Amino acid sequence: MRIAMLSVHSSPLARLGGKEAGGMNVYVRELARELGQRGIGVDIFTRRQDRTTPTVLPLGRGVRLISLHAGPAAPYDKNLLLTYLPEFVSRVRCFADSEDVSYDLIHSHYWLSGEAALRLRRVWRAPVVQMFHTLGAMKNSVARSEEEVETKRRIAIERRLLREVDVVVAATPLDRAQMVWHYGADANRIRVIPCGVDLRRFQPGDRMQARAALGIAPDAIMLVCVGRMEPLKGMDALIRAAARLLAQHPDWKERLQVVLVGGEDETQPDRWNSEQRRLDALRHELGLPAHVIFAGAQPQDRLPLYYTAADVVAAPSHYESFGLAALEALACGAAVVASNVGGLALTIEDRRSGLLVPPDDDAALADQIERILTDAALAARLRSGAVQRAAEYGWPAIARRIAALYDELTAANAAIWSARRLVRVS
Ligand code: UDP
């Protein structure tokens, strides 16, 4: 079986933790690798963002990353990509023709790739599996500024994809329900298959060793949050919660450290985006410039150090369709406090594998962090519950479910086309 995986606007090899690269990129990379291991050929098509990237890059057994032009070979606003999508689609077709390959199934990621998938389906007569990763309507329901509002065009395309693709994969039952509520989607066309986590990379380690590697004092009270610098991630609530904790525990003043992983680090203020500048202003306003540290985006293989070193990992997002960083933290045996929203509310079982709080409620966040910091037995219980929970999300099990879906759809598609041939002959 050969799969065309479309990740048009963002490459699975993009630097994670920046503006446009996060969970979806990790998902595409990990799923493709796992499928490749299972003997399924995967070509991942993405748009070329610089001139130095080779057209074909092998990513492991059976997996290739194909980077093709769609407009300028430079970063640009993803909404502009719609203009260049016809160019991208015809380049994909030319690539496939030049190699004399066709694909049994198209697996598209994000609404922009879905639009390309519908066009390619006509050429290859292949079924389309769509994943949104985030939904425009959900982002809009928590948006606080014009800058955060997604376009009507995006919502319209998402609605059309929900009607026209063969199957949509939702990461959680809630994700599926949101597609039904906000877009009037038919629930029968949506399968729920969660995201996976690399349990070899993310596993419990030695806290003191991790702290030594990061240069964090053994007696520091370390709160960590990992995510792109976007208002949606709610990092401001964590900074406010830290201020509350210090007001209640003045003796923690020398020890408390809030480490924000993502965006740019302290040495690159000219590259901070508007959200990071807002967080910077907030830490100054609350008198915490030395307590809140911008660690910058980190390569994923360094993240286990942060999750392991932390006393608490916070995931204070306003919305997460799944929430991979929180799952990675669980896998490392972190004590996690997360917003009671989206995928976070389903992955984390409150008081068993983490603590859940209402979103954007820094008082509740501070209370639950304090509980963990002052109750060693609770912290130990949550840490062991977290590891147990994460074990359910290993990639081999998740990829098996995706591969079974591919089998089902390709078999049904083959039956449809052979029936059509018979009708034509008779
Ligand atoms: N990530 C990373 N380095 C960073 C920040 C994030 O490797 O500095 C990765 C993280 O490991 C996770 C993904 O980016 O796999 C973020 O996924 P999540 O679902 O938490 O958020 P999203 O970016 O999809 O909103």
Image: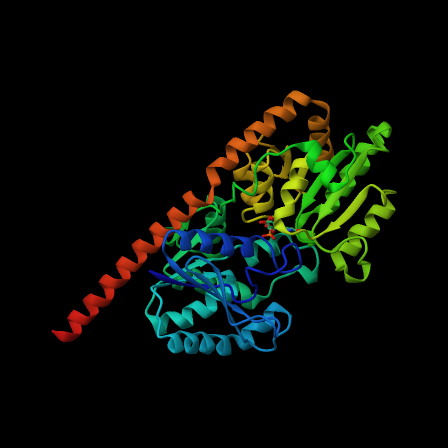
Where is residue 11 shown, x and y percent of the image? 56, 63
Where is residue 232 shown, x and y percent of the image? 66, 51
Drawn side of residue 325 relative to residue 426, left or right: right
Viewer-proximal residue, 31 or 175? 31
Q: Quadrant of the C terminus?
A: bottom left
Residue 351 visible in this rendered orientation of the protein: no
Where is residue 298 shown, x and y percent of the image? 67, 51
| In the depicted structure, whether residue 198 falls above or below residue 77 | above
Which residue appears at 57% of the width and 31% of the height? 350
Where is residue 308 shown, x and y percent of the image? 65, 36
Which quadrant would residue 366 be assigned to in this image?
top right
Q: Quadrant of the N terminus?
A: bottom left
Viewer-proximal residue, 131 or 103? 103
Drawn side of residue 215 relative to residue 49, left or right: right
Which residue appears at 72% of the width and 27% of the height? 373
Which quadrant would residue 160 be assigned to in this image?
bottom left
Viewer-proximal residue, 208 or 87? 208
Drawn side of residue 34 relative to residue 332, left or right: left
Give the color scheme: rainbow, by chain, secondary structure or one colour: rainbow
Number of dots carrying numbers: 0
Q: Residue furthest left?
A: 426
| In the depicted structure, whether residue 253 falls above or below residue 302 | above
| In the depicted structure, whether residue 52 falls above or below residue 131 | below
